[in-house]
Amino acid sequence: MVWRKSTTNHFLLRPNENQNRIFEAMILPYDDNYFMKKALQEAEAAFEKKEVPIGAVIVVQERIIARAHNLTEQLNDVTAHAEMQAITSAANFLGGKYLKNCTLYVTLEPCQMCAGALYWSQLSKIVYAARDPQRGCGVLGTKLHPKTEIVGGILENEASNLLKRFFIQKRNLN
């Protein structure tokens, strides 16, 4: 059997000469919401570890090649942001330092440090959920690679609510 993409973004399973039936597999289209939900799962994992709940995934050709979340407390490392972990993992997966044709999905707008690393990795696209009005790369005027597209606000409420819940719990424990 051979998988072929139809005009409706569903994959059709077409029989070869030895088969007499047509099967259709209903696969949800992979869009920004789908991959941001995967980044939110990583943020939830960070939340469970008492890390600031930020998650990230890196995608190439509709395939997740890296998953990460903040590990700054666990590793005692201020650079262990979700984006930095994801960049390292994706570069290892691809066998090179440049992440051209890759998209980063992250639950919070990247900070200046992460934006610098994203610049050098040459990602094609960055999609973030919640804006960071204090430390985000946009408000600080950090430049990204000129070929990098940036999109914000995808599942913003879900990401913002998780961050708010984390900081409310943290304040109540202190």
Image (cartoon, helix red, strand yellow):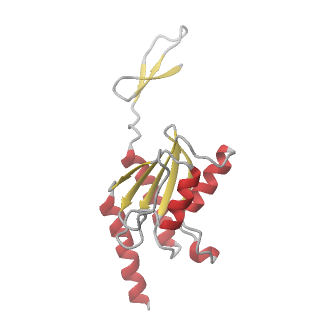
Q: Position of residue 25 (x, y in %)?
A: 42, 29
Instruction: Give the image location of residue 164, x and y in percent.
Output: 35, 74
Image position of 99 with respect to 15: above or below: below
Which of the two residues, 169 or 95, is positioned nearer the viewer here?
95
Which residue of the protein is positioned furthest toward the bottom in this rendering?
A: 174
Judge whether 73 appears above or below 108 on screen: below
Residue shown at 39% from the left, 29% from the top: 10
**Which quarter shows the C terminus?**
bottom left
Q: Residue at 43% across / 21% down in the picture?
A: 23
Q: Quadrant of residue 40?
A: bottom left
Which of the two residues, 45 or 98, is positioned nearer the viewer here? 98
- The residue drawn where x is 52% and y is 48% is 123
User: Residue 171: percent from the left, percent from the top?
Assistant: 39, 87
Left or right side of 91 for 32: left
In the orientation shown, which residue stands out farthest toward the left? 157
**As displayed, is residue 6 above or below residue 120?**
above
Q: Residue at x 46, y 69 (%)?
A: 53
Which x, y percent locates residue 138? 38, 62
> Which quadrant does the N terminus fall into?
top right
